[in-house]
Image: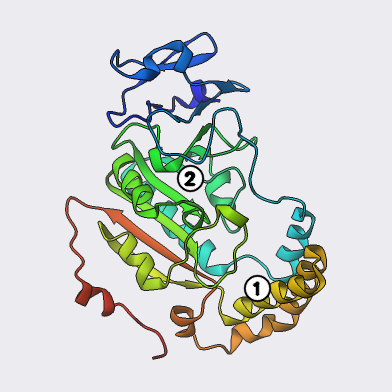
Amino acid sequence: MVNQKKIPITCPCSKKIPLKKIGNKYICKNFKCEHNKKINGFKTYLSKPIIISEIKTDTLFSQNSIKSKIDRSFEKYDKLKKIIIGESKITKKNCDIFIKKVFKLNNKPKILVIGGAQKGLGTNKLWDNNSLEIHSLDIYHTGNVDVICDCHYLCLKSNFYDGVWIQAVLEHVVEPRLVVKEINRVLKLNGIVYAETPFMQQVHEGAYDFNRFTVLGHRYLFRDFSLISIGGKDGPEVVFCWSLRYLIWSIFRTKSIAKFLSLIIGLVFKPLKLIINKKSLYDASSGVYFLGEKVKSNKLSHKDLIKLYKGQF
């Protein structure tokens, strides 16, 4: 619950003024803000605040509609997927590094998980560590979510978090650069950020799917942060399965058949991971990752950016 974790929620207006609760609503403490009036206050759902402003922000979402835009009808295949394909060793490794880094900053690190409605694959150690204080937000409600908001306009205090984890989210935001600036704002100096974003994947949330990044493009998105590590995850064999799934879907017009068959083919292709050139993760990976640190100032020139390339070309 919000009051137990003491999440420092603020108005999504540009001044990020703290909110106060009146009845079942939150209002901005700034008397000049439209959200200071109870009629324009922020609603709650199961005691969790819905901090979405259609007055102060350009948002796709509404306080009156917090249902997921994600098609969850095929989650029955997730366990099968985990058995057949397994979890990403890269994500697990990076999760371990992320946790070690934040514990160097604080013996009780505060971690913001953006897009925390569903726990990401390979993140069990993050969610199950009782020494980490996890604040989870998303644009829709599940039992994992503490605050419902649009991450373009984080309704959170500046310089507060030791770490930010954002996995499979930046493809679904209209302005990823704005989200990254917000991440920078809420992180403490020397705070750690970890991001995973698709590279070679087809559209998977219909109209709510906007971006893809190469390893270097993703690095440049986080150019204000110093680099700890970058790379690709899930290689060309996974990319092939993604493409095959959508080919089957387009032919048979049935998503369930396509997803099931692609999982079976994924099992057949799984041994290829052992022989595929690791450099191909820069050129033909399903997704990419960035692990970095907030610093006072970081400059990344275009020439320095291309020096980071470690692909096959």
Residue name at image x 45 percent, y 17 percent: 40
The reply to whether residue 44 is visible in this rendering is yes
Q: Which residue is drawn at 36% across and 69% down?
A: 217
x, y percent for residue 150: 47, 39
Describe residue 65's horizontal placement relative to residue 159 as left or right: right
| Of marks 1 and 2, the one in the foreground | 1
Q: What residue type is labelled 1?
A: Trp
Kindly report the distance in space between the C-alpha atoms of the residues bearing marks 1 and 2.
Answer: 25 Å
Q: Residue 242 carries which label?
A: 1
Which colour scheme appears in the figure? rainbow
66 is higher (above) or lower (below) than 168 = above
Q: In this view, does 103 lie above or below 82?
A: above
- Viewer-proximal residue among 216 and 94: 216
Q: Residue at x 33, y 80 (%)?
A: 309
Above or below, 161 relative to 237: above
Badge 1, how many Cα within 10 Å: few under 14, some, many 20+? many
Q: Which of 74 and 251 is in front in this view?
A: 251
Q: Which of marks 1 and 2 is nearer the N terminus?
A: 2
